[in-house]
């Protein structure tokens, strides 16, 4: 504490503090169409499409 540093230990699993989890949740519940889950190949294609269009067609806003 002499250097005004305070350590805070987080639990081993803290998804709410991991920024990529916010993106995955948005993709899963808002952007992925239901038919993306028909096959693994289709799911991979949809995820690649979403990641490729992130920032232009899809973006997360905290409003």
Image (cartoon, grey):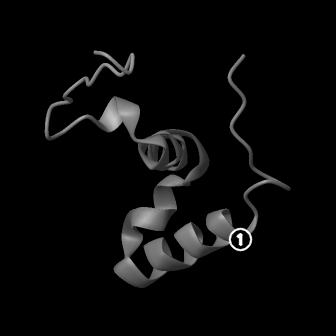
**Image quarter (top left, top right, bottom left or bottom right) of the C terminus:** top right
Locate the N terminus and report the quarter of the image it occupies: top left
Query: Horizontally, is 13 left or right of 26 in the view?
Result: left
Q: Residue furthest right?
A: 56
Q: From the viewer's side, name the closer residue of 19 and 23.
A: 19
Considering every residue shown, the one lying at the far left of the view is: 12
Task: Please name the residue shown 43% across and 84% down the image.
Answer: 41
Q: Position of residue 31 (x, y in %)?
A: 60, 48
4 to 18, vertically: above or below: above
Q: Relative to residue 63, is residue 16 depicted above or below?
A: below
Residue under the image location 21 percent in, 30 percent down: 10
The residue indicated by pointer 1 is: 52
- In the rendered image, residue 39, in percent from the top left (x then y), is placed at 37, 77
- Near mark 1 (Cα within 10 A), the count class, few <14, some 14-19 or many ≥20, is few
The answer to which of 29 and 21 lies nearer the viewer is 21
Q: What residue sits 53% from the left and 49% below the top?
A: 27
Q: Residue furthest bottom?
A: 41
Location of residue 58 with respect to 17 vertically, above or below: below
Q: Which residue is located at x 74 percent, y 44 percent?
A: 59
How many numbered marks does the figure carry? 1
Q: Quadrant of residue 3?
A: top left
Q: Nearer the viewer, residue 60 or 34?
A: 60
Is 3 situated left or right of 7 in this image?
right
Instruction: Examine the image and state in which quarter residue 50 appears.
Output: bottom right
SS at badge 1: helix
Image location (x, y in percent) of residue 33: 55, 54
The answer to whether residue 27 is left or right of residue 17 is: right
Q: Measured from the top left, where is residue 19 in percent x and y?
A: 48, 42
């Amino acid at each position: 504490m002499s250097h005004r540093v305070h350590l805070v230990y987080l639990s081993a699993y803290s998804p709410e503090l991991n920024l990529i989890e916010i993106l995955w949740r948005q993709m899963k519940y808002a952007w992925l169409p239901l038919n993306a889950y028909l096959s693994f190949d289709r799911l991979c294609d949809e995820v690649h499409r979403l990641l490729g269009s992130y920032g232009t067609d899809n973006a997360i806003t905290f409003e």
